[in-house]
Image (cartoon, rainbow, N blue to C red):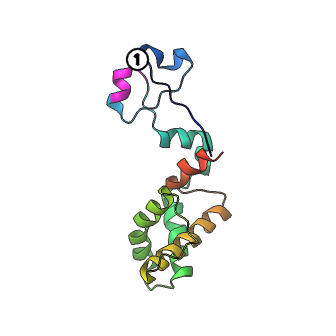
């Protein structure tokens, strides 16, 4: 379990000149505080290293390969495009990909997600949707 503290203070307490990193949900909040915009996702990418985050073309290629291996579908490109959003949600939610979801359809999605993740790891990469969880476990 991780224990992190968040100190809420005056606006004068934020910013790089105070030796603190200020996380903001959007550009408007950052502008109001007089700092550069920085989300948790962006911070995670900076810490993990941008070279480890898979680029869109690599994601498309590996997911298509995962669909071919996992489902043997006749249209792996189309299925990969369809499955990318639910797989990303599973990664964002840090779902247990080994769990049995009960539904045959969900089992197929989980199988493709497992294969896709193993293909990413074989190349030393992570999906952008996984970056927050991987960073928080470091």
Q: Nearer the viewer, residue 81 or 9?
A: 9
Chain part drawn in magenta: 29-35
Q: Is residue 84 above or below residue 107?
A: above
Q: Nearer the viewer, residue 36 or 3?
A: 3
Give the residue at x 36% y 35%.
26
Q: Residues within 10 Å of mark 1 (few under 14, many from 20)?
A: few
Main SS, magenta region, reads helix
Say which element carries label 1.
helix
Q: Position of residue 73 (x, y in %)?
A: 46, 84
Give the residue at x 50% y 77%.
67
Q: Is residue 118 above or below residue 42?
A: below
Residue 34 colored in magenta in the image? yes
Say which quarter of the image contains residue 82. Answer: bottom left
* Total tally of numbered discs in the picture: 1
Q: Position of residue 35 (x, y in %)?
A: 43, 23
Q: Position of residue 5 (x, y in %)?
A: 55, 31
Q: Position of residue 72 (x, y in %)?
A: 51, 85
Give the residue at x 48% y 40%.
40
Q: Is residue 8 above or below residue 119?
A: above
- What quarter of the picture does the C terminus occupy? top right
**Residue labelled with disc 1:** 11
105 horizontally vs 128: left or right: left
Say which quarter of the image contains residue 50. Answer: top right
Q: Nearer the viewer, residue 6 or 78?
A: 6
């Amino acid at each position: 379990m991780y224990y992190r503290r968040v100190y809420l203070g005056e606006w004068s307490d934020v910013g790089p000149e105070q030796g603190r990193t200020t996380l903001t949900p959007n550009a408007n909040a950052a502008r109001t505080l007089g700092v550069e915009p920085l989300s948790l996702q962006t911070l995670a990418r900076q810490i993990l290293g941008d070279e480890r985050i898979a680029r869109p073309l690599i994601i498309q290629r590996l997911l298509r390969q995962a669909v071919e291996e996992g489902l043997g579908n006749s249209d792996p490109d189309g299925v990969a495009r369809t499955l990318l959003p639910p797989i990303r949600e599973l990664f964002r939610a840090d779902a247990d990909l080994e769990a049995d979801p009960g539904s045959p359809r969900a089992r197929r999605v989980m199988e493709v997600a497992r294969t896709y993740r193993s293909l990413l790891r074989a190349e030393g990469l992570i999906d952008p949707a996984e970056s927050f969880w991987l960073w928080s476990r470091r």
